[in-house]
């Protein structure tokens, strides 16, 4: 783990728990909190925001990335995610692809159990590559390719 992640690990996990308090999840009642650590030590929080159309729902992770990226913050050192489930819950497929857009394959993703604040434990740590192997990313669009027929 890089120095910046080690130094901010608890702060980041705590921010994900705080973010979860603002989840708008009247339909699923499944609250999710996410927190992104920028390379310069800033933390950006996100919660899931549901919609009566269901399809308009935005996951906590994507809320955090869109908040950050739309303010020019696009270099990240780690992501933390938590829910009300007793075991760590992993980001959905669409969120994994959004993470892939902005983060390196070795970036740590910390998945915290609901009891994190009480126990300071129950964190599963994965890299983006472990969550999304054989991925497609921005650099693939720069590859040489045959012209269309
Ligand atoms: N959800 C997230 O916020 N992140 C994920 O990675 C998985 C799912 C939200 C979307 C929806 O509001 C609720 O959890 C149930 O799917």
Image: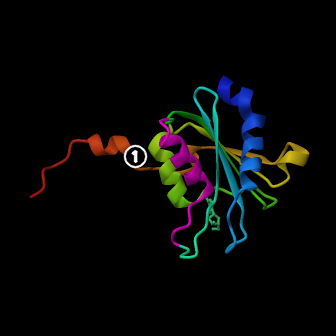
For residue 8, what is the image quadrant? top right
In what element is the residue under mark 1?
A: loop
For residue 9, what is the image quadrant? top right
**Residue sitting nearer the eye, 11 or 88:** 11
Q: Position of residue 32 (x, y in %)?
A: 69, 58
Q: Would you place residue 71 above or below residue 118 in this image?
A: above
Q: Would you place residue 28 above or below residue 123 in this image?
A: below
Q: Is residue 58 magenta?
A: yes
Report the colour scheme: rainbow
Q: Position of residue 15 (x, y in %)?
A: 73, 43
The residue shown at (61%, 62%) is 49
The residue shown at (12%, 50%) is 147
**Residue sitting nearer the eye, 63 or 130:** 63
Q: Would you place residue 79 above or below residue 32 in this image?
A: above
Q: Is residue 101 magenta?
A: no
Task: Name the side, left or right, on which 45 lies relative to 76.
Answer: right
Q: Position of residue 111 (x, y in %)?
A: 71, 49
Query: Magenta stretch?
Result: 55-72
Quadrant in which the N terminus is drawn? top right
Q: Residue beneath label 1, please? A: 137
Q: Which residue extends farthest top?
A: 3
Q: Quadrant of ligand 1?
A: bottom right
Quadrant in which the C terminus is drawn? bottom left
The residue shown at (82%, 59%) is 86
Task: Name the side, left or right, on which 133 lies relative to 3.
Answer: left
């Amino acid at each position: 783990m890089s120095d910046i992640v080690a130094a901010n690990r608890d702060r980041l996990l705590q921010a994900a728990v705080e973010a979860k308090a603002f989840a708008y999840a009247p339909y699923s009642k499944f609250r999710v909190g996410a927190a992104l650590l920028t390379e310069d030590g800033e933390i950006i929080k996100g919660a899931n925001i549901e919609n009566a159309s269901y399809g308009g729902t935005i996951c906590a992770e994507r809320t955090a990335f869109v908040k950050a990226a739309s303010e020019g913050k696009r270099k990240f050192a780690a992501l933390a995610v938590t829910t009300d489930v007793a075991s760590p819950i992993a980001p959905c497929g669409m969120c994994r692809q959004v993470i892939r857009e902005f983060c390196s394959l070795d970036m740590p993703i910390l998945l915290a159990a609901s009891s994190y604040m009480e126990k300071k434990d129950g964190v599963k740590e994965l890299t983006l590559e472990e969550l999304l192997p054989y991925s497609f990313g921005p650099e693939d669009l720069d590859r040489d390719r045959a012209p269309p027929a």
